[in-house]
Amino acid sequence: MPHISMPEGIPGIRALVMVRPETGEHLYALVQVLLRGESPLSEAERELIAAYVSNLNECNFCTESHSEAAKFLFNDRVVVDRVLTNYMDSPISDKLKALIKIAGKVQQNGKLVTPEDVADARKFGANDRDIHDTVLIAATFSLFNRYVDGLASLTPTDPNEYIAMGKRMGEKGYVFPKKS
């Protein structure tokens, strides 16, 4: 049961941004730039980082929706599940493993990221922009996860709803919802 009045039947952050469109538009613009804007990281990799952090934060809505977007963009349902289970034993690049390690540390406390973590990512080819975008995605999704769960927004239980969300996000990006 949501903690505040929200549009009925609208899940997750979509309902929350409709409650406060003056902030919601900016949140959507931010996520559009982070996950669909120009970056040396692919859209699939950025969605995977968002899903990984959301999973660590135990935000079911964000984990499921961004996992499905990553699966759609990777065109691979298995790799995402393996990363969420044990990223070090998953079929992703060493560079992405090093960046996911950094994202996991940011999720806990940004001060946990060490010069050694950054050097490790650089050793595998990460540049300043890769590291910057990883940290910003991890920090932003920690905020989004707390926003969604802190107000107890609707979390669908039907996996097919998340598959449809992931496809929509993968194809259209993050378009601010219009009130019907």
Image (cartoon, rainbow, N blue to C red):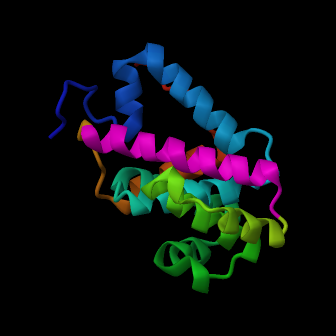
Where residue 172 sits in the image (x, y, percent)? Answer: 65, 39
Residue occupying image coordinates x 79% and y 46%: 39
Above or below — where is 150 with respect to 155? above
State whether the magenta stretch is mostly helix, strand or loop: helix
Where residue 173 sits in the image (x, y, percent)? Answer: 64, 39
Where residue 133 sits in the image (x, y, percent)? Answer: 69, 47
Above or below — where is 157 with respect to 94? above
Residue 120 visible to an observer of this rendering: yes
Asked if the magenta segment contains residue 143, the reply would be: yes
Residue occupying image coordinates x 79% and y 48%: 129
Residue 66 visible to an observer of this rendering: no
Q: Which of 91 and 133 is in front in this view?
A: 133
What segment carries the magenta color? 126-150
Above or below — where is 78 with respect to 100? below
Residue occupying image coordinates x 66% and y 40%: 34
Residue occupying image coordinates x 30% and y 51%: 156
Where residue 86 sits in the image (x, y, percent)? Answer: 51, 80
Above or below — where is 88 with respect to 62? below
Q: Is residue 17 left or right of residue 79?
A: left
**Which of the 4 image quadrants contains residue 180?**
top left
Badge count:
0
Q: Which of 170 and 129 is in front in this view?
A: 129
Quadrant of the frame with the N terminus: top left
